[in-house]
């Protein structure tokens, strides 16, 4: 199968899996939101922000290194496996011992047991890191899609069952742990590769010459994306963090379901054509255009319909999240494009530049969040938005320079998405203004008419999404 065919197939499987995963996850979280309180979500958010970091750090940048390099062999794979396993064991032990200190940071003694149980996830996840990287390197996105889809569905069912039986915050722990375990088992099952009892210092040196920059970048990037969780949880409490977490998840939807899916497929593809900048530029612009056409209307639509959506889907007790969702919806638009720059830096072997830029960005966002705390979660959201509008365009510009792409061409690529999303937002606003009805009726009518109008606009503009097989035609 050619690289173009693999890329197209990867995109289809990636998007198919994401549609299923997000539909399942949306239903699961809506059910759990009705069964649990914002404080329950806030407590688990206090814990998982540390474990998200641990899971990322335990990976040590190995996946990107194995995917990016075209000269890896069994020595590299097996050596990386044992390094990741050792890192997973070490991190689990660290969290077991540091649980009282983390709980003390938040002044929440009840977190100690939560942390010690979830600490096992570091060990479990370490078993499948290399297998997952090999599947991605071989562009076997079907296996990854099946593993993630099955894991999210089964874990969701188990979490809801626990919540129905009055387990409270522990139902979220059970949901988190079962997802990690099931996904790891399935990735291991789908991958034909098995580790051998060998360890090569030369192979490790080859991997870490690239992955050290990636590890540093991932650490800084994760800190930048989660500093608001840490500070909101510490200074504003579990309830505020639960509300903020809900709003933040909506902002992440375009990143997780559009940008990251396309980027996950395009990174190995870009790595294979990294020396042909003309092809990289052409396909990158098509990728950005597709992302903007999907993510921009979703985010502006969420801005307009946030009140009705939150009240109907999650309930009145989550109503305070509405202004946060609206503020962060604009951040979601920007970050859906910003999420692609990492693929350019990595595929060109310049994660060192990305690392330095992320250090600066992390310092800026930390200052913004700290200042915003004075005005509660609304202040945090507003200052976070200010950071995005000030910093993200510069970061994108630096990425464009790396592949000699003029900024005007990028603006031209995202313009159709901006135009269509603006027209849809206008239509939804008119529906809300002229129709006096229940939240449910307005939400259903607006979503239905908005979707129809969106498809009409795409057909009228004859855009790339009508023939998405052309997205990767130049690879």
Image (spheres, helix red, strand yellow):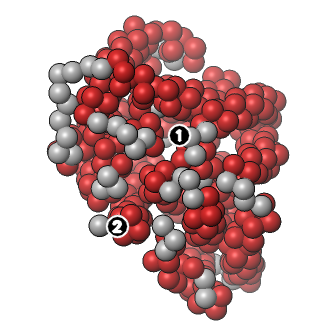
Nearest the viewer among 271 and 181 is: 271
Rendered-image quadrant of the N terminus? bottom left
Coordinates of residue 324 in the picture (x, y in percent): 69, 49
Q: Which residue is drawn at 27% across and 40% down?
A: 131
Which is closer to the viewer, label 2 or label 1? 2
Viewer-proximal residue, 393 or 274? 274
Helix, strand or loop status at disc 2: loop
Q: Position of residue 145 (x, y in %)?
A: 32, 56
Residue beneath the point at 56% across and 40% down: 349
Quarter of the image for residue 400 reads bottom right
Assign a secondary structure to mark 1.
helix
Vertical side of 75 occupied by 440: above or below: below
Query: What is the quadrant of residue 69 in the picture?
Result: top left
For label 1, the residue is 38
Question: Relative to 139, does residue 427 appear above or below in the rendering?
Answer: below
> Which residue in the structure is indicated by mark 2?
2
Task: Classify mark 1: residues with Cα within 10 Å, few (<14), some (14-19) or many (20+).
Answer: many
């Amino acid at each position: 199968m050619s690289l173009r065919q693999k890329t197209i197939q990867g995109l289809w499987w990636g998007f198919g899996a994401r549609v299923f995963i997000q539909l399942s996850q949306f239903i699961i979280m809506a059910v759990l939101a009705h069964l649990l309180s914002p404080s329950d979500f806030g407590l688990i958010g206090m814990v998982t922000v540390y474990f998200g970091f641990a899971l990322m750090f335990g990976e040590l940048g190995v996946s990107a290194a194995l995917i990016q390099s075209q000269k890896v062999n069994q020595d590299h794979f097996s050596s990386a496996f044992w390094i990741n396993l050792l890192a997973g064991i070490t991190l689990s032990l660290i969290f077991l011992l540091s649980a009282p200190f983390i709980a003390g940071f938040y002044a929440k003694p009840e977190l100690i047991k939560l942390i010690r149980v979830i600490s096992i996830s570091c060990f479990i996840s370490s078993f499948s890191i290399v297998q997952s990287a090999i599947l991605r390197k071989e562009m076997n996105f079907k296996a990854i899609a099946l593993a993630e889809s099955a894991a999210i569905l089964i874990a969701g069912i188990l979490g809801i069952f626990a919540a129905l039986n009055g387990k409270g915050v522990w139902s979220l722990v059970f949901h988190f742990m079962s997802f990690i375990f099931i996904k790891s088992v399935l990735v291991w099952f789908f991958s034909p590769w098995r580790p051998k009892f060998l360890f090569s210092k030369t192979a490790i040196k080859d991997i870490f010459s690239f992955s050290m920059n990636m590890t540093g970048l991932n650490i800084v990037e994760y800190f930048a994306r989660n500093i608001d969780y840490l500070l909101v949880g510490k200074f504003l409490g579990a309830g505020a963090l639960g509300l903020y977490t809900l709003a933040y998840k909506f902002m992440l939807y375009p990143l997780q379901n559009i940008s990251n899916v396309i980027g996950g497929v395009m990174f190995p593809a870009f790595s294979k054509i990294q020396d042909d900048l003309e092809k990289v530029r052409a396909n990158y612009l098509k990728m950005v255009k597709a992302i903007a056409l999907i993510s921009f209307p979703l985010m502006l639509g969420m801005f307009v319909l946030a009140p009705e959506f939150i009240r109907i889907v999650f309930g009145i007790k989550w109503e305070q999240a509405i202004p946060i969702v609206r503020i962060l919806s604009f951040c979601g638009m920007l970050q859906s494009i910003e999420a692609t720059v990492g693929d350019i830096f990595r595929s060109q072997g310049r994660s060192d530049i990305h690392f330095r830029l992320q250090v600066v960005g992390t310092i800026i966002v930390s200052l913004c969040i700290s200042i915003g705390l004075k005005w509660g979660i609304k202040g945090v959201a507003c200052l976070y938005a200010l950071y995005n509008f000030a910093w993200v365009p510069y970061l994108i510009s630096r990425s464009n320079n790396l592949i000699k792409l003029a900024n005007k061409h990028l603006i031209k690529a995202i313009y159709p998405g901006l135009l269509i999303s603006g027209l849809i937002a206008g239509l939804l606003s008119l529906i809300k203004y002229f129709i006096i009805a229940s939240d449910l009726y307005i939400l259903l009518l607006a979503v239905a008419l908005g979707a129809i109008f969106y498809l009409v606009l795409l057909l009228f503009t004859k855009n790339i999404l009508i023939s998405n097989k052309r997205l990767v035609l130049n690879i």
